[in-house]
């Protein structure tokens, strides 16, 4: 966080006496920039943005209201604190200035102690906001990095599990990739239908796509004699082969119990499927 002594206060006033008073009041505490008309102030600010502006209202040419309006309209200058300084005792004018974005009013003739206190208070608030914004940016960066690491962990977990399934059944690899692509293609079409718009979104589709390869991990639990049998399975063997979905469901259920309801494995567990049964429709086993 910056120190107050590192801040720049800009004084914009067409009267040298007023400038001298403000410079004497604030010069020991801050860097001071001076402009004697609105045009010069805007030219300076275009090159270097001050931390706070003390802005006279009644000036020849461009008045303080117009300077304020232009600054608040600018993307880089809209947040610069502006304190109007004026000899007018006009509530309507004060209201107008505050509505335009000024943060405070200081009336002439100046009371040095009041000027010092108000400038200090507003600069402290500005620096605190800057620090908060920096902390939020750092936090957002950490969240993005943590999310990236979590996604990599999920991808590694799926890759490891599906690699194990592939070593148990060489035909599984191509099937897994095809299923993953089919799931995404189907979800992309379903989201276009009104009845699915409240159910599916891009994040859900991404989870479905990533978790699709897990649907066959239960084959790890099937006996080699059945999984690698070259010929047709008999009835008993076929019944045992179908249990690979139960093995997969049990593994995912345990993962959910270990890692909680926010676990990545909740979705594949809820949508864990049975293979085609004697040419009939696919059954869905829900948690």
Image (tube, rainbow, N blue to C red):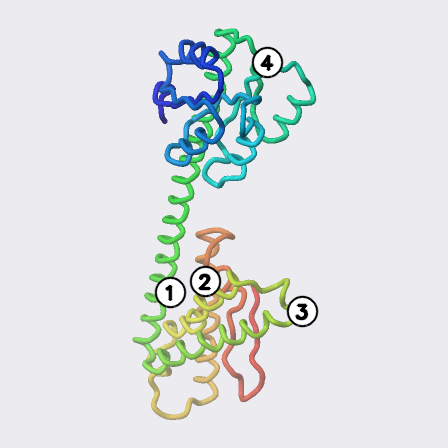
Q: Residue at x 67, y 17 (%)?
A: 90
Task: Nearest to the eye among marks 1 and 3: give it.
Answer: 3
Between residue 60 and residue 101, name the one nearer to us.
Answer: 60
Q: Earlier in the sequence, mark 2 or mark 3?
A: 3
* Figure check: 153 above or below 211: above
Pointer 1 or 3: first along the chain: 1
Q: Nearer the viewer, residue 112 or 237?
A: 112
Contact flag, marks 1 and 3 (Cβ < 8 Å):
no
Mark carried by residue 252: 2
Mark 1 → mark 4, Cα distance in angstroms: 72 Å
Q: Farthest front residue?
A: 60
As drawn, the label of residue 87 is 4
Q: Secondary structure at mark 2?
A: helix
Q: Mark 1 to mark 3: distance in Å? A: 30 Å
Q: Is residue 91 left or right of residue 165?
A: right
Q: Residue furthest toward the right? A: 92
**Mark 4 or 3 closer to N-term?**
4
Please report whichever mark, 1 or 4, sits nearer to the chain's N-terminal start: 4
| Label 2 – label 4 distance at C-alpha | 75 Å
Is 282 placed above or below 31 here?
Answer: below
Mark 2 and mark 4 in contact? Answer it, CB < 8 Å. Answer: no
The vertical placement of 280 against 183, above or below, is below
**Residue name at image x 39 percent, y 57 percent:** 151
Residue at 35% across, 87% down: 229
In terms of secondary structure, where does tag 1 sit?
A: helix
Query: Which residue is tagged 3?
Result: 195
């Amino acid at each position: 966080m910056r120190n107050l002594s590192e801040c720049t206060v800009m004084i914009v006033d067409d009267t040298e006496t007023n400038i001298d008073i403000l410079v004497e009041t604030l010069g020991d505490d801050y860097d001071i920039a001076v402009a004697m008309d609105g045009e010069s102030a805007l030219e300076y600010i275009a090159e270097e943005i001050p931390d706070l502006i003390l802005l006279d209202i009644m000036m020849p040419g461009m008045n303080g209201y117009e300077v304020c309006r232009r600054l608040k309209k600018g993307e880089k200058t809209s947040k610069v604190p502006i304190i109007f300084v004026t000899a007018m005792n006009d509530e309507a004018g004060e209201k107008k200035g505050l509505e335009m974005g000024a943060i405070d009013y200081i009336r002439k003739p100046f009371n040095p102690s009041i000027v010092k206190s108000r400038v200090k208070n507003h600069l402290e608030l500005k620096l605190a906001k800057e620090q908060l914004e920096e902390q939020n940016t750092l936090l957002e960066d950490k969240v993005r990095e943590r999310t990236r690491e979590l996604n990599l962990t999920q991808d590694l977990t799926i890759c490891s599990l599906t690699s194990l399934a592939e070593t148990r059944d060489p035909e599984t690899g191509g099937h897994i990739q095809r299923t993953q692509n089919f799931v995404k293609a189907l979800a992309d079409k379903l989201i276009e239908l009104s009845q699915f718009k409240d159910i599916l979104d891009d994040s859900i589709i991404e989870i479905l796509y990533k978790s699709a390869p897990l649907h066959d991990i239960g084959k790890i639990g099937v006996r080699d004699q059945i999984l690698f049998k070259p010929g047709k399975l008999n009835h008993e063997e076929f019944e045992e082969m179908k249990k690979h979905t139960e093995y997969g469901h049990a593994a995912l259920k345990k993962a959910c119990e270990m890692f909680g309801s926010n676990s990545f494995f909740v979705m594949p567990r809820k949508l864990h499927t049975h293979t085609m049964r004697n040419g009939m429709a696919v059954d869905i086993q829900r948690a």
